Image: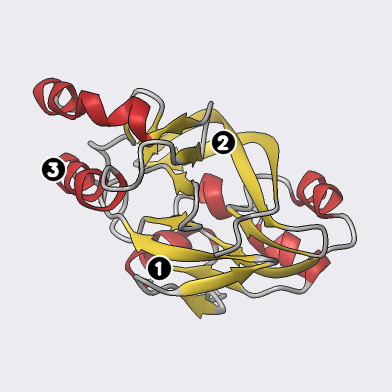
Amino acid sequence: MAGVARIDRVVTSGIFSLDGGDFQVDNNIWLVGDDNEVIVVDAAHTAGPIAEAIGGRRVRMIVCTHGHNDHINAALALQDIVDAPIALHPADRMLWDVVYPDVAPDRLLDDGQLIPAGSARLKVLHTPGHSPGGVCLHDEVGHVFGGDTLFKGGPGATGRSYSDFGTIVESIRDRLLVLPPATVVHTGHGDSTTIGDEAPHLAEWLHRGH
């Protein structure tokens, strides 16, 4: 199977808002595909830098790994520029509606769905816990685009509305840690990591509870 020929990262900054709190965050946006066609993973904060990095390539889809505002708040503006459908898992529709109460996502993501990305394809892995509709995208060769499910150092945050620590640990254990150790995890915030670097720490995460 052909792998991803090109991965670009764009970092944008803005506000993550949930449960009455506002937090300044830097978000990773991943452009996955090749020199002709890409999938945008998480259109965060500002559409301009994302569109600039896309260049003249065709955008197959704008995929939201989950519905928190900092991962979707540039989606419609980017769509206006690149004319691509926006996709979200249906279990996060209530989070989407906070940001876009009058507009629905164009597509609904299903576990196991395959999305073409230039010379490769990405498989949707439903990984709830950080949010009910959280997903990761796996190229089935050596990369997974993990949103806020797994980070360098542990699981994505839980303890806020619609999140659950036991659920995210189950998702990571059963859907991600079974991938080859060399698989690179491209995260929604911060540095990338690998499955091999994170897998030995599962018991530690369970003990600390986050």
In the rendered view, tell whether residue 200 sits above or below residue 88.
above
Query: From this viewpoint, is residue 97 visible?
Result: no
* Along the viewing direction, whichever of 208 and 14 lies nearer the viewer: 208
Q: Quadrant of the N terminus?
A: bottom right
* Along the viewing direction, whichever of 102 and 8 lies nearer the viewer: 8
Mark before the other along the chain sequence, 1 or 2: 2
Measured as percent of width and height from the top left, residue 110 is found at 38, 74
* Along the viewing direction, whichever of 106 and 179 lies nearer the viewer: 179
User: In the rendered structure, are the residues bearing label 2 and label 3 in contact, judged by CB atoms less than 8 Å apart?
Assistant: no
Residue density around tag 3, few if under 14, some if 14–19, many if 20 or more, within 10 Å: some
Measured as percent of width and height from the top left, residue 15 is found at 56, 36
Write down the residue under mark 2: 15
Q: Give the alpha-carbon distance from disc 2 to disc 3, as whole Å.
A: 27 Å
Kindly identify the amino acid type of the residue bearing the numbered disc 3.
Gly
Dot 3 falls on a residue whose secondary structure is helix
Residue 113: image tag? none
Name the outermost residue toward the left: 207
Q: Depth-wise, is mark 1 or mark 2 nearer the camera? A: 1
Q: Give the alpha-carbon distance from disc 1 to disc 3, as whole Å.
A: 20 Å
Kindly identify the amino acid type of the residue bearing the numbered disc 2.
Ile
Q: Give the alpha-carbon distance from disc 1 to disc 2, as whole Å.
A: 22 Å
Dot 2 falls on a residue whose secondary structure is strand
Write down the residue under mark 1: 89
For residue 140, side relative to residue 112 (left or right): right
Q: Depth-wise, is mark 2 or mark 3 nearer the camera? A: 3
Q: Quadrant of the C terminus?
A: top left
Write down the residue under mark 3: 166
Figure colour scheme: secondary structure
Name the outermost residue toward the front: 1
Measured as percent of width and height from the top left, residue 178 is found at 26, 47
Measured as percent of width and height from the top left, residue 6 is found at 71, 50
Residue density around tag 1, few if under 14, some if 14–19, many if 20 or more, within 10 Å: many
